[in-house]
Image (cartoon, rainbow, N blue to C red):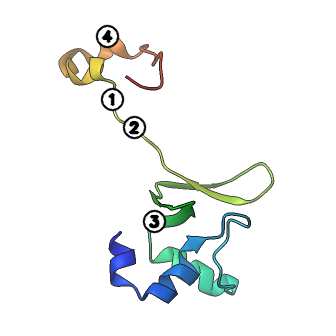
Amino acid sequence: MEKMLTTDAKYFNDHYVLDLKTNKPKFEMTEEARQALYAEDYFRYMKSGKMFLRSQIDTMGVDGDGNEIVFELKTRATSVMRYDIGNFIDYLDYEVGKQRG
């Protein structure tokens, strides 16, 4: 949201918002310009229907087809560890059994 509020609307839409079909920005940039743009920002933006999404990039990599990918890592401790941090070693084999709740 910070970038959206501090950047010219047209520039923001052309450079940060990805097309849903191509998963690329509307504005075709040279590879050099794209690398410079990505180097200055740790967020990626996308629109899905009426919803606007921002992802903070923690990690970059390459998928099996050689395409560059970015993804976010979540490393928060489960509640069982957070509430008994002094004995965290007792919970190293703990497995999350459900996605929510």
Q: Mark 3 vs mark 2: give the one in front.
A: 3
Q: Which residue is mark 4?
A: 90
Q: Which residue is mark 2?
A: 75
Characterize the local packing of mark 1: few (<14), some (14-19) or many (20 or more) Cα atoms within 10 angstroms. Answer: few
Report the front residue among 101 and 95.
Answer: 101
Mark 4: secondary structure:
helix
Determine the CA span between mark 3 and mark 2: 18 Å
- Residue at 42% x, 26% y: name it: 100
Q: Amino acid at mark 1?
A: Ala
Q: Amino acid at mark 2?
A: Thr
Determine the CA span between mark 3 and mark 1: 24 Å
**Could you tell me if the residues under marks 4 and 1 are in contact, i.e. CB atoms within 8 Å?**
no
- x and y percentages locating residue 51 in the rendered image: 49, 59
Determine the CA span between mark 4 and mark 2: 18 Å
- x and y percentages locating residue 65 in the rendered image: 81, 53
**Which quadrant: the N terminus?**
bottom left
**Could you tell me if the residues under marks 4 and 3 are in contact, i.e. CB atoms within 8 Å?**
no
- Residue at 47% x, 15% y: name it: 97
Q: Is residue 15 above or below residue 73?
A: below
- Residue at 39% x, 37% y: name it: 75
Locate residue 15: give its quadrant: bottom right
Report the front residue among 10 and 37.
Answer: 10
Disc nearer the start of the sequence (3/2): 3
- x and y percentages locating residue 77 in the rendered image: 33, 29
**Could you tell me if the residues under marks 3 and 1 are in contact, i.e. CB atoms within 8 Å?**
no
Q: Mark 3 vs mark 1: give the one in front.
A: 3
Judge left or right: residue 91 versus residue 58: left
Determine the CA span between mark 2 and mark 1: 6 Å
- In this view, the residue farthest toward the right is 65
Locate residue 79: give its quadrant: top left
Numbered badge on residue 43:
3
Q: Amino acid at mark 3?
A: Phe
